[in-house]
Structure formats: structure tokens, C-alpha cells
Image (cartoon, helix red, strand yellow):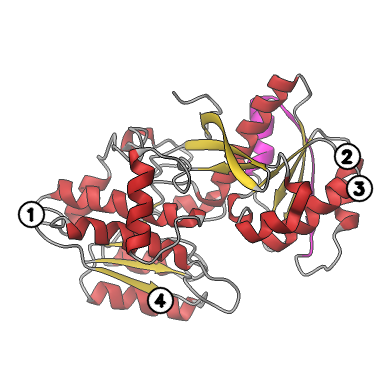
Amino acid sequence: MVGQIQTAESAAAGFQELTDGAQACFDAINATGGVNGRPIDFQPCNDGADPVQGETCARDLIDSGAVAVLGGVCFSCFSAPIVDILGEAGVPYVGGLPVLPGEYANENFYPVTNAGGSAALFANAAWIMSTAETKGVDPSVVEIYAAVGEADPTLEQQIDKLGGEYKNRIGFDPASADLSSIAQQAIDESANFVSVQTDGPNTVKLVTALRTQGFEGDIVILGTAADPQSIEGMGDASEGVFVAAFFEDLANTDSPDAVKYRADLEAAGGDPGKGLSATGYGGAFVVATAIEAAGDDVTPETFIASLTSLGPIEPLFNGQLAASNANDDFPRTYYFVSYANTIQGGTITPTGEVFNFYTGEPVS
């Protein structure tokens, strides 16, 4: 049995598409005979953004015999010892989306397919440097972020490492109705790039304000803020805004992987147009691959042994996911690929650039 703990629904936010993506992947595998002749029993548990409920999820899945627990946007997992509880039982937490670099230190946490919130900032930094070189402008950056909890230093560190100029980090209260003054602070820094790190509604306010108040440089935003509603809300101000994605455009392209992905999502009642559906699907694909490699005797121990020797995985990851990709900063992340996209005519459009977001180097 494979479990999942993530915030599918809560009063604050919900990410049901992550569960839908995983369910779609497992359903498709089971429809063709399962793994090693056996179906995968998938049991998702919604933590409701509540640490107590998250802890209950963890203990229930352990008692049910989970060999692994899939993650996602799990508000409870690092605010309470969810990953540690699973670890004490020997059950790995696989494929979650942490926010801060320090969260990767937990030895029972296997992000595998994505370096979480920090990954978006790695990807943004790589794209900023590449675009600055192409345009012949200075890679000067100002960052705007929702000042809730600790600020993530990743963008600053990467811009400095890659030889750019990080001008300032401007925090704001996400409950503010008017963010025009924040936008003006960013404009006053005279940077060529503004990185906006917040949710969809506040991204709409900031991007709109930046353009209305005269900012003519490039804007980069988080993929989670590039949902159809937010893009529509930004209107003409969204034109040319950069969005990184960690999978190819599975919702719109015609590659065999994309066609199968859409068919699997639709068969399971999911929405292939929601970006996090691909994250859920990809995590499930990795878990199924590791279960297959474990053979007939699948336990948490044999699963971990298979997981830590994976790669390269085809077809969904185009051979770019392998355990050998792990490094000192991300010791249990195996996939560092980012696909560059810009918003054009109200649609997320691939630019054709694919790069390793950790190193900033192009990926063939």
C-alpha cells in the first residue's frame, strides 16, 4: 500500500490536483495489471493544514502497512514531526514540496522529483542570468515576497553565485489590499528583473501594479501563481511574464507522454490543466518504478533501497531523473530540470529553453 499526506482541502488552501495526479497514475498502472502482477493500493489522507490531523494521517498509514507515503503541499509535515513519525516506523516520505532549504536535512524525506519552493527560485535565477545575457542587460534583481515566516535566501544566493546583482528583498503583508507602494519600492531599485514570490491573488496585484506604474523590465513569478484565474486577472500585464515548470507542458503538447498523461487524468476525473497535477502524477510514477524494482518482496526497506538507486527513468522524465543526480545541498533530490515558459496572449507558452536549475546549465 502507498499512502499520501498533503493538504488536499482546508479553510486556507487546497491542492486536490496533487492527489488527483497520483490517483490517475496509479489507476492507469492498475488498469494494465499493476506492478509485478499486483495492483497498487493508494490511500491518500488530507491533513486539512492541521498538524494534529497530519499526525493522525501518518499513524493511520503506518498501521495500514504503507511501504511509502507520497507528499505534496503538506502544511502539517514540517510544522509537526510527521516525517519523523514515518521515519521511526521506517516508512519514507516521498515527493513532497518543502519551502526552505533546511527542510532537506531530514533523512527520511525524499523530494526526488522537485526541490520544492526553493527549486522555483533556483529556476528563476537560472532564467534571469540566461535572459540577461541574451538581451545584453545587467542581471540585476529585486525580489518581492510575502513576509510570512522565514524568508528563503535561495534567489539571493543563486544570483550571487552565478555572477548577477541581487539588489534587495522587499517583504509585504499578504493581507494588504493595496500593494502599489510595494511595487514602487521595487521599481525604485532600478533593477532589470523583478521576482515575485507569492500566491496567485497577490501576484495579480503586484504584476498589475508594476506594469501600471511603469516597470519595463522582466518579471518572474511562481508556477503556483500562474493558474488560469490569476493569468486572467493580470490581463495585459501578464504578457511576457516568466514561469518555470519542472515538467514539459503536459497539458498542451502532443508528445506521447503528454497525450497519455491527459488521458490518464481525464479518466480519473482530474484536470490536466492544473500544473500540480503533473507533480502528483510524477511522484506516483517514481514510486511505482521503485516498487517494480523492489521485486516480489516489497517492504519499506526494499522500497528505499530501490528508490536510492533509481535512474535514469524513462519516459516521463526523459532520462533526466536518476539517484546519481543528488548533491550535498539536495541529497535526496534526483531531478533538477526546469522548462522555461512565458505568458503569451493569456497562455503559458514554452520558450524552448530547458536547463538544470541547480547549475543554470542548459539541458539537452
Judged left or right of residue 166, residue 12 is left
Highlighted magenta segment, given as a residue range: 154-173
Please rate how many residues cluster around mark 3, counting C-alpha atoms within 10 Å: few if below 14, some from 14 to 19, many from 20. some
Label 2 to label 1: alpha-carbon separation:
60 Å
Disc 2 marks which amino acid? Answer: Glu
Whole-percent x and y of residue 36?
10, 53
* Residue sitting nearer the eye, 310 or 34: 34
Specify which label sits upstream in the sequence, 3 or 2: 2
Label 4 to label 3: alpha-carbon separation:
47 Å
Label annotation for residue 277: none
| Label 1: element kind | loop
Q: Residue at x 46, y 49 (%)?
A: 251
Q: Is residue 163 magenta?
A: yes
Q: Which residue in the structure is indicated by mark 1?
A: 296
Whole-percent x and y of residue 279?
43, 53
Asked whether the residues under the numbered discs 4 and 1 touch, taking CB atoms below 8 Å apart as contact, a structural biologist would say no
Disc 3 marks which amino acid? Answer: Gln
Specify which label sits upstream in the sequence, 2 or 1: 2
Disc 1 marks which amino acid? Answer: Asp
Judged left or right of residue 6, residue 178 is right
| Label 4: element kind | helix
| Disc nearest the viewer among 1 and 3 | 3
Label 3 to label 2: alpha-carbon separation:
14 Å
